[in-house]
Amino acid sequence: MAGDWIKMRPSLLTSPKVNGIARILEDSLDVGCALTTGFRGPMSEIVTRNVMRNVTVASLLVIWGAANEHTDDGVFRNADLSDLDDMVGIPGFGSAMAAVGWAKFDPESSSVSLPNFSEYNTCGRDRAKEKNAERQRRFRENHNAKSNVTHNVTNNDREEERREEKRTTQGLRLNLPHRVEAELPAEKRASRFALGQLPDDWAAFCRSERPDLDPDETFHRFADYWRARPGKDGRKLDWAATWRNWCRNERYPPSRVDDPASTRRLMDAIASDPRFQDVPS
């Protein structure tokens, strides 16, 4: 695959095998002719060993890059050592690699192998698989991380919404102008009139506040009236207070000629009421 990388050791330039290849190349007349224009001698006469080591390293990178790109296992099939020479443009380079153990020609299979090549490099297809697997791994990690963040944020938002709804509901209940009866405490809830007989304290109040009234008769009128009231009109929070107001506002019925008992009660009430007593001068 074009543009892929291959591994190279930083200490490759000082490798004894690189130095061995450089020594072989610098003594070759063919190399001198190939790398110069018109020189007819060995490279050792015009350049130093260090120059040839750099030429060797550059040529090795070309060979290894070709193997990484075009082979699955570092084996050039249907090839011989001269094909390595053609790749780098240096005659005898393949033989020099074979001399130091970095190349091996097999005449039976017509192939050139690079020993231990797979230890340091992988073929293009394997490398592509590794890259795809690595990309997928990073994608899954990023996706999981984002999912966790989104999940936490969503949960926090929902929890905040629930708290806000609770606060709003409580505020609405507090601001209602009229509380419904179901929300009122049981002891303050209005009820219908349910007494069957006149309580003693009610009778005492009636006799004290309105001596002109008969407590029992007044109670019967009171009970009949409120039991007949429909719906919420027949409900009161405090029936004792309602009774006291009833007694205060109750009109004494007009006396009838045929009812001497009524007349007698009226006269007795007037006679016993201090408000009707003579005031001494």
Image: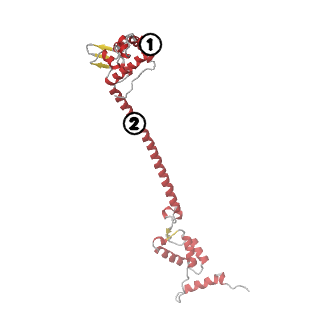
Image quadrant where residue 215 sits: bottom right
Residue at the farthest front position? 38
Q: Assess disc 2: are there few (<14), some (14-19) or many (≥20) residues with their C-alpha within 10 Å of its C-alpha.
A: few
Along the viewing direction, whichever of 1 and 230 lies nearer the viewer: 1
In this picture, residue 150 sits left or right of residue 266: left
- The image shows residue 33 at horizontal and vertical percentages of 36, 14
- In what quadrant of the picture does the C terminus appear? bottom right
Residue with the mark numbered 2: 139
Q: Nearer the viewer, residue 88 or 244?
A: 88
Q: Nearer the viewer, residue 258 or 71?
A: 71
Residue visible at 57% across and 75% down?
245
The kind of residue on which mark 1 rests is Arg
Circle on res. 155: none
To which quarter of the image does residue 138 belong?
Answer: top left
- Distance Cα–Cα, label 2 vs label 1: 50 Å
* Residue situated furthest bottom in the rendering: 257
Q: Residue 247, relative to residue 278: is it above or below?
A: above
Dot 2 or dot 1: first in sequence order is 1
User: Does residue 158 sit above or below 106 in this rendering?
Assistant: below
Would you place residue 263 above or below residue 195 in this image? below
Image coordinates of residue 135 in percent, x first then y, are 38, 33
* Residue 228 horizontal/vertical position (percent): 46, 75
Residue at point 50%, 57% (across, down): 168
- Spot occupied by residue 57 in the image (x, y as percentages of width and height): 41, 18
Q: Which mark is residue 49?
A: 1
Dividing the picture into quadrants, the one containing residue 106 is top left
Which is nearer the eye, 244 or 70?
Answer: 70
Q: Locate the N terminus and report the quarter of the image it occupies.
A: top left
| Residue type highlighted by circle 2 | Phe
